[in-house]
Image: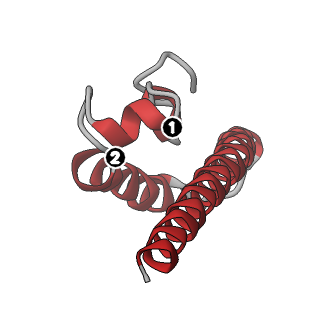
Amino acid sequence: MAILVTQLKTANEAVRTLMAQRNDERTYQQKAALATARKQADEAYHDFVAMLNAAALMDESEYTYEVLFNQINELINYKRLYIVPKKGSKSEDEDGGDSEDRGQQVGGSSNDGEG
């Protein structure tokens, strides 16, 4: 009976080890996928801001983009205050750190010098 218990303990430990390895691999794959998606989202956002700013400059109609710009900038500020982790937090360090350029303001104002 003791031999059977020992074999079960050994088998259970092997299963735990394999499960931990699998979980580590999946975590790495998820982090890589999230980093790629974040980079693509950032690039799309910067393109969007550039197009909005260009449209505002080129549009000769009486329409002003100020209301739209203010709404978008309010969302950016909300994200900065409540959604983006504070500097030095664990989740910020995991996703590559500095997120200052991820909140580029529209309408010609920006915290990073871009417009």
Q: Quadrant of residue 115?
A: top right
Q: Position of residue 54 (x, y in %)?
A: 73, 39
**Element carrying mark 1:** loop
Q: Position of residue 106 (x, y in %)?
A: 52, 42
Residue at the (43%, 28%) spot, across then down = 100
Separation of marks 2 and 1 at Cα, in angstroms: 11 Å
Front one among 27 and 112: 27
Residue at the (31%, 48%) spot, across then down = 77
Front one among 22 and 86: 22
Q: How many marks?
A: 2
Residue extending furthest top?
Answer: 113
To which residue does mark 2 refer? 84
Rendered position, 101 above or below 73: above
Residue at the (65%, 43%) spot, across then down = 35
- Please tell me how crowded label 1 is: few (under 14), some (14-19), or many (20+) other residues with Cα within 10 Å: some
To which residue does mark 1 refer? 95
Q: Quadrant of residue 42?
A: top right
Residue at the (73%, 45%) spot, across then down = 36
The amino acid at mark 2 is Val
**Element carrying mark 2:** loop
Q: Position of residue 94 (x, y in %)?
A: 46, 36
